[in-house]
Image (cartoon, helix red, strand yellow):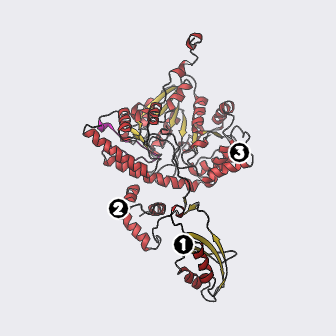
Amino acid sequence: MSDSRSCRDFVAPHIAVLPKSGIRYFFDLVNTMSDVISLGIGEPDFVSPWSVCEGAMYSLERGRTSYTSNLGLLSLRKAICDYVAEEFGVRYAPENECLVTVGVSEAFDLAIRAITSPGDEIVYHEPCYVSYGTEIRMSHGVPVPVCTYEKNLFALDPADLEKAVTPRTRAIILNFPCNPTGAVLTDEQMRDIAKIAVKYDLAVIADHIYSELHYDDRPMHTVAALPGMRERTIFLHGFSKAFAMTGFRIGYACGPNSIVDAMMKIHQYAMLCAPTTAQYGAEEALKSARPDMHRMVAEYKGRRNVIVSRFNEMGLSCFNPQGAFYVFPNITSTGLNSQDFAVRLLQSKRVAVVPGNAFGACGEGYVRCSYATSLEDIRTAMDRIAEFLDDLKAGKA
Amino acid sequence: MKLEDRKYILNALVKNAKTTAADLAEQLGASEQEVAAEIADLEKQNIIRGYHALVNEDNLHDKPVKAIIEVRVRPEREGGFDRIARRLSNFPQVTALYLMSGGYDLMIEVRGADLNEVASFVSSKLATIDGVLSTATHFLLKKYKESGIMLLEEERDERLKIVP
């Protein structure tokens, strides 16, 4: 007897229509192969700083294995608020304006759910992280992507943003430095975007997960620090990228009490609290692992310089991104689309890159390459990609 | 060159002395000549004192014996510990020598072909020197980490192959 005859389709229609992440197909393909050098990994290749691991272990030794407050350990929230004030220039109250979450992914989910009513439009820039559009749809909101372009170094053009705003617009999402492009915003662009948010009374979800990984000499900045913005900005950040702590799954949200409180309600019922051991690890990161972070950032910068110059040398135009650990070379000169480029490169040269259209339609014509991998592997991968281009020209690939 | 870049070069060479100026130039977005000049300057200023291989003797066929020797010495009225330290440094068996705070004065790392060679160095050379008051010899049994490099395990990349 088949199951399909005895029961109906239980999956909710608005979930059934969601596309699977474009990365998934590619992931399955890569996993069937060996000796692949992957430039497709969106997480640090460094192991978490030892002091962080040791801090987490020490908490276990002391038997700190119960739930924490829904908001997270107060000592951790204090450390986070001090850090955000010191590095970004915005002061939040650890008691009621800061929520510790299971990675920024959860914080982002909470932020969207807390502010979105059915039919609300949320504007974000594409190419972008794979979850933005689908998260909005899961909350019955309407995703409104705004394209960013290579000619603007993939920064969000405030004029394009304003054109996308309608009376139904509820919020803007900003993620700079950006996954997948590595783009950052200039101070001027950020000011203009803030003015638009104030003018149309919009909330801003600022995803800062890559903020520490920037390679210009200026300090970190956030839209929340601009006039009229603190009260409308949900500042999201976490430990995964800067401190190489992806598996710890600790993120946080800071914002005005009314919004953090609403997010806390969802978090309270859905998650209870972030893992206690990981929270202790995160506290130790802020206390002692900043030198480790600076060392990693210096290494990323060296690798970025190598990968950008290699791509340009081999004739794939690649702008020099000022943040994150991704480059986004333009592959249109090969005559292939991003998907074909990635698949054929993988099959013929065993190098994995992620097709740009996995991050939104306007990522077509590009591929994302992560340089969170050893310099040695980066160099080998670049040699192989150069060979691939030669093969293409000779009609061999 | 910027201080930050100079540090970058130094860190890279500490990690791998074989890193070439061309490699570093690519990482720094500088020219090979600039990097070579910076390295030459670091050498000239005696900041870089040499380049050597990190050897895991455990994997050698004729594995040498190493010992750490704590030495108490009588300091001299002029020069303190320097003269005797220099004298000890001259022995080829001595691979490192430090002046220490605490319960003894000099820590000497000695290397020999076998146990006997090290023992005879201590009894016939080291202990007989005028001014040496006492020695305590500790033989090295196993090396886990040296110069910041873990010698035991191979690091493996356990990450998923594709991560958004």
Residue of label 2: B32
- Quadrant into which the N terminus of chain A falls: top right
Instruction: Say which quarter of the image contains residue A251.
Output: top right
Q: Looking at the picture, which amino acid does disc 3 mark?
A: Leu
Instruction: Say which quarter of the image contains residue A275.
Output: top right
**Label 2 neighbour load within 10 Å: few <14, some 14-19, many 20+:** some
Mark 1 chain: B
Decide which of A28, A21 is in the foreground and name it: A28
Residue of label 3: A74
Q: Position of residue A270 (x, y in %)?
A: 66, 30
Q: Nearer the viewer, mark 3 or mark 2?
A: 2
Q: Which mark is residue A169?
A: none
* Residue sticking out furthest to the left: A394
Alpha-carbon distance for marks 1 and 2?
A: 42 Å
Q: Could you tell which of marks 1 and 2 lies nearer the N-terminus?
A: 2
Q: Are the residues flagged by discs 1 and 2 from a single subunit? A: yes
Magenta segment boundaries in residue numbering: A315-335
